[in-house]
Amino acid sequence: MDIQDKVTKLYRGSQLRDIFISCLVTDLTLDSMLVTIKALFSSNLDTSVVKQVFLDKTLNASSHWLGATYQLADMHVTELEPTIHLPTDKPTSSPSSQHFQLNFTVTNLLYSQDIAQPGTSKHQQNKRSIEAALNQLFRNSSIKSYFSDCQVSAFRSVPHSDHTGVDSLCAFSPLARRLDRAAIYEEFLRLTQNGTQLQNFTLDRKSVLVDGYSSNRDDTLTESPDLPFWAIILICLAVLLVLVTCLICCLLLTICRRKKEGGYQVQQQRLGYYLPHLDLRKLR
């Protein structure tokens, strides 16, 4: 959307560029051209600062213009909620949205510096396309009543390939029930042909993560079935018993061999060899 791109470009070129993340047009009324935009920042800001930067950047002579296309009549800034919640800092009983980090790799989108730079048209075009695909996906899912929106936060390079990694943040409402990352992960796989196709984007199934969760990691850990604890104890006892038995057998075998050798020597001494011409008893 042109308005969304212009607002993004505005804040990217302002003193707030280091903490500005993204913006999203959430409501557009055509009859009066009333536009509602949700802007995300990486740290808390006073609403007056956000508004003042916008006014300063849109001031042209005596009126305010967004680019050369849209003349602005009025503006209000409202703080809706804290910005991005880290996965480890999710509220346990707060009515605010739950945020889940959704990561995946697009294999038919070649990575370049242009796509990584937020101010470029290539970045904005792919960002809008992927956000639209994600929003449509979850709005047609079994968890659509809890879904709010998804926003792409960054495009990144993927090691040892020319594919493009996508980092996005999806918001869900916990009003009806508290969602977990596994449920969102499974729903995403179900609606993307097992994590391989997001509309026109081809995905690497193994790259799909929701807050760091992936069934691939669990499969790796459970490739060899785990034995029950009692079975492990029995195996250890059996091995120990075999070792003790072997040791006892070796000891008994050694004792028997020594007894046989001793008995043979005694028998030899007792019997000896009898030589009649050396018998001293005959000299008497």
Image (cartoon, rainbow, N blue to C red):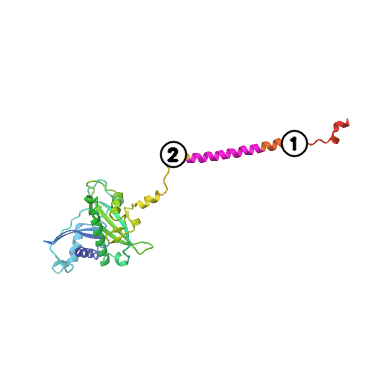
Is 254 in the magenta?
yes
The quarter of the rendered structure image containing the C terminus is top right
- Which circle marks residue 268 in the picture? 1
| Residue type marked 1 | Gln
213 horizontally vs 261: left or right: left
223 horizontally vs 129: left or right: right
Q: Residue at x 70, y 36 (%)?
A: 262
| Residue type marked 2 | Trp
Disc 2/disc 1 C-alpha distance (Å): 57 Å
Residue 73, picture quadrant: bottom left
Q: Secondary structure at mark 1?
A: helix
Is 225 in the magenta?
no
Q: Secondary structure at mark 2?
A: helix
x, y percent for residue 10: 22, 65
Residue 44 visible in image: no
Q: Magenta stretch: give its range.
A: 235-257
CA neighbours of label 2 inside 10 A, class few (<14), some (14 to 19), many (20+): few
Label total for image = 2
x, y percent for residue 203: 32, 59
For the stretch drawn in magenta, the main secondary structure is helix
Q: Residue furthest front?
A: 193
Q: Between 24 and 263, which is closer to the camera in this rendering?
A: 263
Residue 207, picture quadrant: bottom left
Q: Which residue is mark 2?
A: 230
- Which circle marks residue 161 in the picture? none
Q: Between 55 and 199, which is closer to the camera in this rendering?
A: 199
